[in-house]
Amino acid sequence: MEAANGHLQVFEDLFPLGGDFLYEFMQCDGHPGLVLHVIIQKTKEIKRASDGKPYVRRGSQSLPVGADRLESLRRNKGITSFESETVSAPVEIITNSLTVIDFMLSSVPTGEPEPWLRKQMMIVGDKPTVAGVLLYSDEPQAPLPKRCAIKIYRYKTTDPTGSRENLAFDPLTIEGSLYEQIKAAVAKTSELIEEVKILGPEGLAPITYPFETLHEIITNAVIHRDYGTADDVHVRIFDNRVEVESPGRLPAHITTHNILKERFSRNGAIVRLINKFPDPPNKDVGEGLATAFAAMKKLKLKDPVIEELENSVLVNIRHERLGSPEEIVMQYLTSHEEINNRTVRALTGIGSENKVKTIFLRLIDAGQIERVPGKRGSASAYRMATSSE
């Protein structure tokens, strides 16, 4: 253990409070020596290695971060936020817009736009901030192009990725202030989803996702994204799922594992001020995603899957039932004479024919189903087991 003291001293210097790393010594019977196992938690700050340089992990290598990428890393960490940057545009786009006039009349009826916006730090000097433009400009996409709209796609497929051939129509672009964008995007997504039909136990039926889930996940994608990344929010509607992709990685200490429990706002001003609008899209209590997950459970649907990509966060809202595939097969057979491999894949979202064959074999072994006589190969079908005489 003494041989590890130098390593542990380095960790103590990097993490003096001791809360960001854990270590243990591991041994294996039959092999001499010990292995030092160290777990480094995701931190809120940028940590520099013993050579004075910050590094990021990419695949199996650690890459140094140069001065040109340091600010981007700060934004990814949530140390700084693009929302506080100023925009080269006249302040009148937020002091004399229809959006700010409606907002002031409903939320601050005794105030005047410019003094109130300056008090909220939405105007610095003679320029509006990014947050001010996003919240109070009628068309923030003009001064902030390619970084603050929502794109909606409808792919008529269950393939892992959509393609031009699967597009039902040209992608829709939702623009306007963040408050109006969120309302319009949620409404349009709900409308398009209602047109999707899926195979259920009773035949084709409209697909159903909880409104709360769509609303909370789209809201989170808009208000917590990294506006320093030149990209829009993307909502992709497939036949068996909805994907919402938000530019920017998870900030600070937030990971896909603790995101439902921990709180951190990359865009604190946006989160606080959009909550002052009438019927705000966010409740500002840190429970938006938890609400989205709970709503899926009420409909007996599987939890959304959150994935952190290289430069974005992807939330996959799957239309997959919580029941086991075996239960779904048996439920279907209570109202249908037979079932085949393709139908099971459509009902469960399972993509592999071989996995479905394994499910059929388990149910046959359990005496629950039997093969329909005379149907073989690709025409194979199964029915409830009949008692043998």
Image: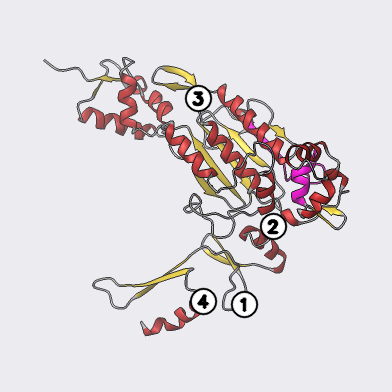
Q: Which residue in the structure is indicated by mark 3?
A: 207
Q: What stretch is highlighted in magenta?
A: 130-153
Crowding at dot 3, Cα within 10 Å, few <14 / some 14-19 / many 20+, comes out as some
Tag 2–tag 3 contact (CB < 8 Å): no
Please, is residue 26 above or below residue 126 in the view?
below
Q: Which residue in the structure is indicated by mark 4?
A: 16
Tag 1–tag 4 contact (CB < 8 Å): no
Q: How far apart are marks 3 and 4 (CA)?
A: 52 Å
Q: Which residue is drawn at 37% across and 22% down?
A: 378
The earlier-in-sequence mark between 1 and 4 is 4
Q: Which mark is residue 26?
A: none
Give the side of residue 274 with respect to residue 328, left or right: right
Q: How far apart are marks 2 and 4 (CA)?
A: 26 Å
Residue 163, given in percent of the width and then of the height, sits at 61, 33
**Residue type, label 2:** Ser
Q: In which quarter of the image is the C terminus?
A: top left
The earlier-in-sequence mark between 3 and 1 is 1
Q: Which residue is drawn at 79% across and 41% down?
A: 100
Q: Is mark 3 on a helix, strand or loop?
A: loop
Tag 3–tag 1 contact (CB < 8 Å): no
* Magenta residue check for 319: no
Q: What colour scheme was applied to this rendering of the protein?
A: secondary structure
Residue 198, given in percent of the width and then of the height, sits at 48, 23
Q: Which residue in the structure is indicated by mark 2?
A: 81
The earlier-in-sequence mark between 1 and 2 is 1
Q: Which residue in the structure is indicated by mark 1?
A: 52
Please, is residue 52 above or below residue 66 in the view?
below
Give the side of residue 238 with respect to residue 68, left or right: left
